[in-house]
Image (cartoon, rainbow, N blue to C red):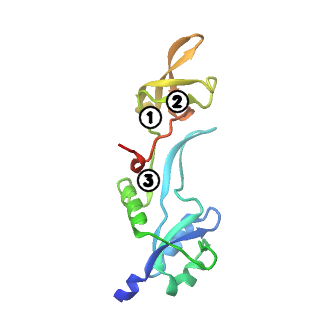
Amino acid sequence: MNPSHTQQKRWYCLRSQLKRERIAAEHLRQLDGVEVFAPRIRYRKSTARGRIWWQEPLFPGYVMARFDLDSLSRQVCHCTGVSHLVSFGRVVPSIADTFITQLQTELAADAADETFTTSPLIEVGDEVRVGEGPLCGMSGTVVQVMPATERVRVLLEFLGEDRAMDLDILSLILPRRPLPNQISH
């Protein structure tokens, strides 16, 4: 490959057709000179059928692709599952290589197939609120985490007394936590 051709490659954001991020990514990967990044997140979710594993795109409706805009934009835009290149008027902004590299590095620890699994982060001492069930709306403090059973023991004020109750972790509204790069010392 020509070195000057490689220097023209940049990351761009593509809008996918509705719910077709994975299809767009698969077809883009078949094009010569196109690198694709379409991370997916996998997590447990409570439904009427019980707990299930759920997968969805990290960036719903979007796929990142690295290619030479001048020579491949037409092929990329007409790829199955792709709606269009994200642009502002006639300007098609590129995404910084460092942003994509950092995301790939963070996700690489979990999976090589761009799917990573996440679980709720909860610790003893966290203030939580019950989000469903007969205790919905009550607030309390986590006193024990039981990860094997996906349950936590929460100290709730109930009938004028503090009582420790075992609750399903997926029934709780958890505290917001700063992202690792947002923590100030």
Q: Within the image, what quadrant is residue 101 found in?
A: bottom left
Residue type at numbered disc 2? Val
Q: Earlier in the sequence, mark 2 or mark 3?
A: 3
The residue at the far front in this view is: 185
* Quarter placement of the C terminus: top left
Q: Within the image, what quadrant is residue 32 found in?
A: bottom left
SS state under label 3:
strand
* Quarter placement of the N terminus: bottom left
Q: Earlier in the sequence, mark 2 or mark 1?
A: 1
Q: Percent position (x, y) of residue 15?
A: 60, 69
Q: Residue at x 56, y 68 (%)?
A: 23
Residue 54: numbered disc: none
Residue type at numbered disc 3? Phe
Instruction: Say if mark 2 contacts mark 1, CB within 8 Å.
Output: yes
SS state under label 1:
loop
Q: Percent position (x, y) of residue 138?
A: 59, 24
Q: Nearer the viewer, residue 149 or 5?
A: 5
- Residue 1 seen anywhere in this rendered image of the structure: no
Residue 122: numbered disc: 1
**Which residue is label 2 attached to?**
128
